Image (cartoon, rainbow, N blue to C red):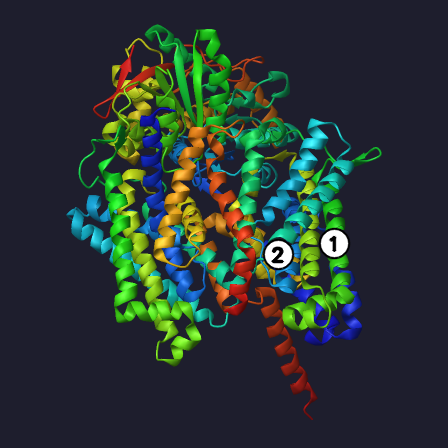
Amino acid sequence: MRNYLKYAVVLVLVVALLALGGISCSTGEEGGTTPTPSATPKEAYKVGAVFATTGAASNLGVPEKQTVDMMVEQINAAGGINGHPLKVVFYNTETSAEKCATLVTRLIEQDNVLAIIGPTTSGESLAIIDTVTTAKIPLVSCAANIGIVTPVSERYWVFKTPQADKDVVAYIYRYMQQQGITKVALVTDVSSFGAGGRGILKSDASGYGITVVDDQTFTTGDTSMQSQLTHIKGTAAQAVICWATDKESAIVAQDMKTLQMTIPLYCSHGIANMNFITAAGTAANGVIFPAGKLLVVDVVPASDPQKEVLVKYKADYEAKYGTGTISTFGGHAYDALSVVVIALGKIPEGLDTAAARTAVRAQIEQVTNFAGTGGVFTMSPTDHLGMQPGSLAMIEIVDGEWIWLK
Amino acid sequence: MSADQFVQYLVSGVTQGSIYALVGLGFTIIYAVTRVINFAQGEFVMLGGMLSFTLARSAGLPLAPAFILSVLITAAVGASMYVLAIRTAKRASVVSLIIITIGAAIFIRGIAGVLWGVEPDRPPFFTGHESISFLGAYIHPQALWIIGTTIVVTIILHLFLSYTMVGKALKACAINPVASSLVGVNPRTMALIAFALAAAIGGIGGVVMAPLIMTSYSVGVMLGLKGFVAAAIGGFKSPVAAVFGGLLLGIVESLAVAANWGPFTSSYKDAIALVVLLLILLIRSGKLAAEEKAS
Amino acid sequence: MLALLKSKWQYPVIAALLVLLILIPFEGFMSQYTTLMIFIGISTMVTVGLCLLLGYTGQVSLGQAAFYGMGAYFSAVLSKGYGFNPWLAMLIGAAATGAFAYIIGYLIFRLKGNYLAMATLGLGIIMWILFRQLSQFTGGPDGMAGIPFLSIGGFVFDTPFKRYYLVWLFCLVILLISQNIVRSRTGRALRAIRGSEAAAESIGINVDQFKVKIFVLSAVYASLAGSLFVHHLRFVSPDTFNFLASVVLVTMAVVGGLASIWGAIFGAATVRILSEDLLLGLGEWDIAIYGLILMVIMIFMPEGLFVKLKEIFERLRLRYKRRGAEP
């Protein structure tokens, strides 16, 4: 019996060693192509990217990754950053905070990246704040929760590009105030995104003279919200606010139509892509939601500082991935990587990894008036989101199209 | 709560309940004949929906052939799963079989994710999309299709099991596999039929519910769980009991939202299915234990 | 080479392996695997419990992640939310989880096979829902961050290097305890139960009591592992403890081999390495391949991959020995 165990343990380690040895050859997916080396090729600037391309947040993560792939190609085709090729090391977090933390550690310690963009969700972002702070590497998150960059004193290394959910809610409530709506019912997902929205919707309502008369929730993956909506029908709600991503929001829209509810449905920016319209079909008409101007780029006035960037991003993305594929989520990744690229363009040559990371962070913090897809960014030591007001558009879906309600 | 609201809660509950029932039927059939809990049952439902979407929308087939083909393919997948995974496992223990079916479920889901991507899809409604008024409540025509299909499938299944040779053989195998093999019923053939049948019913369910609830590669997880609870309420014995279980679950969930009881917000709705499951298991544990020992 | 592994060489071999284990986190050796090894160690702790449960009681727990999560959340909430000493929080967590498992165990071990599995499944998911919903304590779906480090006096376990040794110390102690149990009277009783419950009952063994004991033990192991987990990651969220997590744990036990204690390391390591490294490169195929592996192992090697490998190894050794003995 003794002998068995010892062989066993030996086997364990032999196999483990082989596996581990074999692994040291495999690294993450690397995006983009490097240009043909010139006479003195410069070392590539490595940036890490963690997005959720599978799992609950995949409809956000996939356009984020695709945007990054596209950008890396473009940047390297144009000669890189000050002659340095850009290399993005990408890992899929599978919408798991635990996986994200492991992968980020890997990016920091094994891949030696200079900065990290992503992750996709608030939960994942919150999970790695300690990791990036201890490792002293800048992070530009693509997630919604304002807690990711506040309090700024504890977020020295963390930035983000999407609008804070607090601002999105404020936008909706302001619009509702103008429409004379005073009573609303909530239908939110219990996931991180939905729960975050729900918290703010409840706490900020009174500031706009709005009362939440019903507060219903559902779980991701539920197939019917009719019961919750039936309950809402029995209240005096003048509008329904749904905070979830496209699939569940589509079910809410469909159920509202089935129940022949006449009050308007307001959704979150989680439905800012064509998937919602495809899934909800005719039930999508009349749905109102706030989103980046990317969705209505055609009617954005030429005087808007974002116009050029929006038009180019939409044209490039749809040329590569197909018409109607753009979403504001991909736009967040565009903004995040752009901010890092701007910073990389300004750091001195010849820095070692640690010094480079510190330099990149400092440069990100100094980004001023950068017109991105989500808004115009001006970062500062007291504001790591840096978004100027006026970056959102209130959109209504009419006949399957996005119409900007001004 | 007004009378109209109450009817609406019932209507919504019956619709959801029919969905759970269609999934639960498959669990019941396989368990009754083979004593295996097929964790991949939800995936059969998913396949039915995904295939019908592809065939109807992308391949442009007319609805009826698309659905029949979807169901047939799903049945084939079920049969293959039996032959390749279950039968090959020979004298596997109960625990092993559970893990095998879990592996199969993950495998099927993974393949679906590769083939169809992660985006949800919605096949076209069978007959239009304006809801119908009914006793003060509203019901979507597709929901009527779902409820109708559940009733029809249950009746046909009952007739099949009671009046056809194959059906009666299946039933015999379910009651006592040893004795029935003595009179010439081959348990392996019966198991194969059970799997194919359960997969077909799952596929039918998937086809008819996908237009209403949408379908995606991961839809089988939640459906499988709820369908399992439906079958458990029915005691894994007869199709009718499973349907009853499904309807009960659907209505209880719906009314729980109506009750809006204290801190238990509607987010606990899913917990209901699980609590029901646990209660059933605990209450009948004595009886179930005796059954397992006997088989 | 095979001859080396016979009796008199086993102690040097063990010593060599221990030295290897000790040296891994050192810079320039294999330090890039420190974090991976920490996770493997933590997973092993949970897996051992499952291996014992599966192997010696023939029952499966499809909700083991619930105990893992309870340990994690008790540690997180008590140490971060209420300022408890992390060690005390860990102890409370283990005690609470154990007590909970004891009560649950008596209730559900009357069930058998399939039904027991489903009961554990249901419990696992209910715990996950509770982790998510009791947000005043648990931080809700976003979880809790900023969980303090473990420390002894002034020595803080603030680097992966230090935590590696802590985790593996716990892990090896648990493995040795488990091995002791298996070789003791309890172990013999367990093997009797595994052979035939009816026979065991007939010679006076209280089968249900033993099953519950093992269940509680596995819960305590999982709870300790969960506590170590949060003091390493310093973050906890409910999704780490969902149904899929329980499936992964069962996979580790299955790969490691039911009833095999040292195989638990193998199982945990293989599954971790697979899911973290090898499958990463496969992109969207990883889920399908994971399911395929699970199926294949259970169909062809129901005793577990590790145990099967041991068998093959042993057969080769005998064949070699026989050849060597021929004049």
Residue A186 in the image, given as x and y percentages of width and height: 42, 22
Q: Nearer the viewer, mark 2 or mark 1?
A: 2
Question: Residue A194's x, y, as percent?
Answer: 46, 27
Secondary element type, mark 1: helix
- Which residue is label 2 attached to? C109
Extreme right residue here? C153
Residue beneath the point at 48% across and 64% down: C296
> Measured from the top left, where is residue A282 in percent x and y?
23, 29
Give x and y (percent) for residue C323: 65, 86
Q: Residues within 10 Å of mark 1 (few under 14, many from 20)?
A: some
Label 1: which residue? Answer: C174
Dot 2 and dot 1 within a common chain: yes
The residue lying at 78 percent from left, 37 percent from top is: C88
Q: Residues within 10 Å of mark 2 (few under 14, many from 20)?
A: many
Amino acid residing under circle 1? Ile
Q: CA distance from mark 2 to mark 1?
A: 24 Å
Chain letter of the residue carrying label 2:
C
Front in this rendered view, residue A61 or B32: B32
Residue at left offset 46%, top offset 33% = A86
